[in-house]
Image (cartoon, coloured by chain):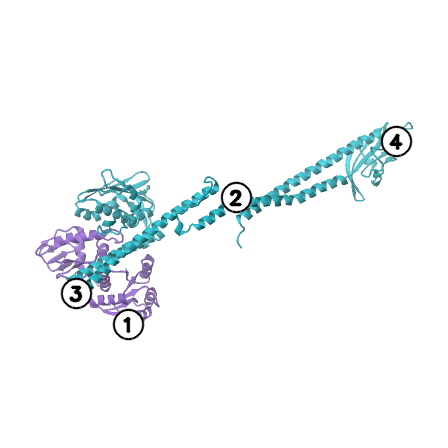
Chain colours: A cyan, B purple
C-alpha cells in the first residue's frame, strides 16, 4: 500500500498535536474552574455561618433560640440548610432541608469551624460546622448547601469541553488540510511541468512566480539539473555524431580502396599497396575502438588503479625521453625543468598516458625548430606539470572543449596530422582519475600552456598499494 | 606439428588455418565448443587456439575440463572480451597465453612459435642475417665486418627483429617487447616508425642489401630478400 500523501500526513500530525495540546489545556481549565467553584461554595458557607450566628440569641431565661429572619434561611429552601445544637445536645434549630442530614457529633466539634462533605440519600452536601458562643453559652452551629447545582454547572462545562474539543480539532484539521493543499499545490504543479520536459524539450525550463521562496529555490535547483542534463545530452549527441563520423571514415576508405582495386586488374605491387592501405585503416579503426572502450570503461568507473608514490620529475623525464625522437625529427628542443622531489600518489601508467598525450600534442602542433618547455613544480599541496608549446595556441572559446572527445579546432587537418582526436580527452580522463585537473591557457610567447595539477604527496612514507592484477598483466583496462 | 583451432567464426577460422598452414603447421578446425572439446581430448595436438565465446560450450569450460583431465597441451586463448577479469580467469584456469581480438596475424604467429618453443633452451647469443651480425652479450653489431654505432634502443630493436627474422613483427609487438609499454592510447606508433627509419639508415647503408623492410599496414620484417 502506498504511503498517504504529504498533505494527509501533514494534516494528521497537525491534528494530533493540536488535539493533545487542547486536551491538556481543557483539563487544566476544568481543574481550575472546579477548584474555583468549590472555593466559592466554601465562601458562601462561611457567609451563611456568620449570618446564622447572628440569628442565634440568648433569651432572658438563658436559653438560646433561633430568631433569624426566615428570608435568609427559608425553612422550605431545598438546597441549603442550617441547624444548631446546645452543648447539652439539645436541638435548638433545624431547617427543613437540614433535617435530611445526620446530626453533628458534638464531641468532635471544635471551636474552629471545619468544612465537610456529607452524602445522604445519594445527595452531596457541603457543610461548615463549628462552635460559637451565644450569650456565654456554647452552641454548635452547622450550615450546609447542596453541591448539586455546582456539580451540574461543572458537568455542563465538561460536556462543552469534551464535545467541543473534537469539533475544534476537526475544524482545525480541515483548515490545515486546505492550507497544506494550498502550500503543496505549487509542488504538484512543478511536478507536472517537469514531467512535460522530456529529452526532446530539454531546453525548456520551469517557471516560478517567486524565485526567492522555498518553491522558487526548488525550481531553481531543478532548472539547474535540467541545464546540466541538457548539456550532457548535447555532449552525448555531439559525441555520437563525431564518433560515427570518425568510425565511418576508415570504413569508407576501406570500402573505396576495395572497390577501386576490384574494378580492373592491377599488378601484384599495386594490390599489395592497396591491401596495406586497407590494413592501415583497420589499424586506425582498432585503435579508435580501443580508445573509446577505454574511455567508456573510465566513465563507468570500472578501471582498477594501482596507486603508488611517483617521482613526477622522473616520470616526466621518462615520458619526454621516449617521445624525444619525435621532437628531434622536427628539430624541436624538449627542455625539462623539474623541481627536486616533486611526488604524487597516482597510477603510474595512467598518469604516464596523460603526460605522453599532452607532450605529443605539443610536439605535433609546435612548428619545426621551436622550443618546448616542460616544468615540473610543486607547492605545499599541489604538484604541477606545465607543458609550454609554441603552437598556434587555443582560442579562449575552445579552451573548455579542447578536452572533449573528438573535438578539433581545425576540422580540415584532422586525419592527416594523425591521432584520433581523443588524445587530450584521454589526458583529461587520466588526470581526473588521479584526482587532478588539466587546463590550457595562452603562453606569453604565443602558443599554449597545458597545466596538469595533481594533489601532492606530502609524506614520503604514504601507503604504497599495488594492484596485483594490473601490475601482473602489465596492462590496464 | 598439429594445431587445433577452436573457433566458431568461419572466416576467422579459415584465416587462422591458412596463416598457420603458411608456417607449415597441420591445422584442424573445430567449429563448435563440443567438437573442440572431444578432439582436444581424443587426439594429440601440440597447441590449441581457443576462442572464448563459443556456442554450446564456452572456451573457459573447455579449458577447465582439459586441465582437470591433465591434458597439458599449451592453450592460447583468443578473446574479444577486453576485460582483465576474463584474461586472468583464463590464465588461472591454465591457459598459456592470450590474444585479444582483433589481433594481428604476425603477433599470433609469434606467440604460437613462442609457445611451441617453450621448454626448450633457445637462448642464442649471436644473431646473424646475411652479413649482419649481432653479439648480444658484448652488445656489438657489425654489418660486413664494419661495426654499427647503435643506441641502446636501436640495439634492442635490431635484436628483436633478428630474433624474429623472416617473420613479420607488428608495431604492437615492438611497443610491448622493446619499449615495454602497453601501446593503448599512448602515441608510440610514430616513435616506433621514426626509430625504425633511423635504424634502417644505419643498418641498410648504401650499397648493402636491404634487410629491414616495412610491410605497409602490418609492420616490419627483417630478411635478406625483398618481401
The residues bearing labels 1 and 3 have C-alpha atoms spaced at a distance of 45 Å
Residue of label 2: A183
Residue at image coords 45%, 50%? A195
| Real-space Cα separation, disc 4 to disc 1, in angstroms | 143 Å
Residue A428 seen anywhere in this rendered image of the structure: yes
Q: Is A229 left or right of A348, judged from the image as shown?
A: right
Residue tagged by mark 1? B43
**Residue at screen point 66% across, 41% down:** A27
Chain identity of mark 3:
A
Q: Name the residue under label 3.
A: A265
Q: In which quarter of the image is the C terminus of chain A?
A: bottom left
Q: Do labels 3 and 4 share a chain?
A: yes
Q: Mark 1 lies on which chain?
A: B
As drawn, B186 above or below A395:
below
Image spot of residue A426 (x, y percent)? 29, 49
**Residue that mark 4 sits on:** A65
Amino acid at each position: 500500500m502506498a504511503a498517504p500523501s504529504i498533505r494527509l500526513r501533514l494534516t494528521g500530525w497537525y491534528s494530533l498535536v493540536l488535539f493533545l495540546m487542547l486536551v491538556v489545556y481543557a483539563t487544566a481549565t476544568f481543574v481550575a474552574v472546579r477548584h474555583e467553584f468549590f472555593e466559592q461554595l466554601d465562601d458562601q458557607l462561611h457567609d451563611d455561618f456568620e449570618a446564622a450566628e447572628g440569628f442565634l440569641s440568648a433569651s432572658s431565661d438563658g436559653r438560646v433560640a433561633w430568631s433569624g429572619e426566615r428570608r435568609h434561611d427559608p425553612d422550605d429552601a431545598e438546597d441549603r440548610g442550617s441547624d444548631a445544637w446546645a452543648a447539652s445536645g439539645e436541638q435548638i434549630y433545624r431547617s427543613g432541608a437540614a433535617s435530611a442530614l445526620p446530626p453533628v457529633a458534638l464531641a468532635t466539634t471544635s471551636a474552629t469551624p471545619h468544612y465537610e462533605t456529607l452524602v445522604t440519600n445519594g445527595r452531596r452536601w457541603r457543610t461548615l460546622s463549628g462552635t460559637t458562643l451565644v450569650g456565654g453559652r456554647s452552641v454548635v452551629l452547622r450550615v450546609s448547601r447542596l453541591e448539586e447545582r455546582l456539580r451540574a454547572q461543572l458537568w455542563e462545562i465538561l460536556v462543552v469541553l469534551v464535545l467541543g474539543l473534537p469539533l475544534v480539532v476537526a475544524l482545525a484539521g480541515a483548515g490545515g488540510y486546505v492550507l497544506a493543499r494550498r502550500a503543496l499545490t505549487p509542488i504538484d504543479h512543478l511536478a507536472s511541468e517537469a514531467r512535460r520536459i522530456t529529452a526532446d524539450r530539454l531546453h525548456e525550463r520551469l517557471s516560478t512566480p517567486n524565485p526567492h521562496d522555498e518553491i522558487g529555490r526548488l525550481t531553481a535547483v531543478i532548472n539547474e539539473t535540467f541545464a546540466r542534463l541538457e548539456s550532457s545530452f548535447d555532449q552525448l549527441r555531439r559525441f555520437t555524431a563525431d564518433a560515427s563520423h570518425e568510425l565511418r571514415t576508415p570504413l569508407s576508405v576501406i570500402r573505396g580502396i576495395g572497390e577501386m582495386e576490384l574494378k580492373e586488374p592491377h599488378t601484384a605491387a599495386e594490390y599489395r599497396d592497396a591491401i596495406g592501405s586497407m590494413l592501415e585503416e583497420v589499424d586506425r579503426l582498432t585503435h579508435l575502438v580501443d580508445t573509446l572502450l577505454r574511455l567508456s570503461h573510465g566513465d563507468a568507473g570500472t578501471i582498477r588503479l594501482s596507486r603508488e608514490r611517483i617521482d613526477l620529475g622522473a616520470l616526466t623525464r621518462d615520458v619526454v625521453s621516449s617521445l624525444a625522437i619525435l621532437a628531434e625529427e622536427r628539430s624541436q628542443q624538449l627542455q625539462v625543468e623539474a623541481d627536486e622531489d616533486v611526488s604524487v600518489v597516482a597510477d603510474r601508467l595512467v598518469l604516464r598516458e596523460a603526460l605522453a598525450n599532452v607532450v605529443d600534442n605539443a610536439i605535433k602542433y609546435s612548428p619545426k625548430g621551436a622550443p618546448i618547455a616542460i616544468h615540473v613544480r610543486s607547492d605545499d599541496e599541489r604538484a604541477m606539470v606545465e607543458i609550454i608549446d609554441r603552437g598556434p595556441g587555443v582560442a579562449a572559446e575552445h579552451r573548455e572543449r579542447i578536452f572533449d572527445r573528438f573535438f578539433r579546432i581545425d576540422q580540415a587537418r584532422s586525419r592527416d596530422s594523425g591521432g584520433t582526436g581523443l588524445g587530450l580527452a584521454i589526458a583529461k580522463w587520466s588526470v581526473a582519475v588521479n584526482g587532478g585537473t588539466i587546463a590550457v591557457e595562452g603562453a606569453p610567447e604565443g602558443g599554449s600552456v597545458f597545466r596538469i595539477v595533481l594533489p601532492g604527496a606530502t609524506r614520503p612514507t604514504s601507503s604504497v598499494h599495488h594492484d596485483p592484477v594490473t601490475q601482473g598483466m602489465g596492462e590496464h583496462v | 606439428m598439429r594445431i587445433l583451432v577452436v573457433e566458431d567464426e568461419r572466416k576467422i577460422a579459415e584465416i587462422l588455418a591458412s596463416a598457420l598452414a603458411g608456417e607449415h603447421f597441420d591445422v584442424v578446425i573445430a567449429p563448435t565448443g563440443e567438437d573442440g572439446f572431444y578432439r582436444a581430448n581424443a587426439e594429440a595436438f601440440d597447441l590449441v587456439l581457443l576462442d572464448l565465446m563459443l556456442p554450446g560450450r564456452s572456451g573457459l569450460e573447455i579449458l577447465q575440463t582439459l586441465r582437470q583431465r591433465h591434458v597439458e597441451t599449451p592453450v592460447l586463448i583468443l578473446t574479444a572480451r577486453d576485460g582483465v577479469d576474463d584474461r586472468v580467469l583464463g590464465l588461472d584456469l591454465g591457459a598459456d597465453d592470450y590474444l585479444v581480438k582483433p589481433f594481428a596475424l604476425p603477433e599470433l604467429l609469434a606467440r604460437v612459435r613462442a609457445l611451441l618453443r617453450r621448454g626448450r633452451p633457445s637462448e642464442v647469443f649471436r644473431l646473424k642475417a646475411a652479413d649482419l651480425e649481432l653479439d648480444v652479450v658484448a652488445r656489438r653489431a657489425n654489418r660486413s665486418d664494419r661495426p654499427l654505432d647503435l643506441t641502446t634502443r636501436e640495439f634492442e630493436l635490431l635484436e628483436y627483429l633478428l630474433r624474429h627474422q623472416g617473420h613479420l613483427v607488428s608495431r604492437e609487438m615492438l611497443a610491448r617487447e622493446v619499449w615495454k609499454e602497453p601501446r593503448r592510447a599512448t602515441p608510440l606508433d610514430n616513435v616506433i616508425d621514426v626509430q625504425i627509419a633511423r635504424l634502417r639508415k644505419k643498418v641498410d647503408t648504401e650499397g648493402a642489401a636491404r634487410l629491414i623492410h616495412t610491410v605497409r599496414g602490418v609492420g616490419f620484417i627483417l630478411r635478406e630478400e625483398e618481401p
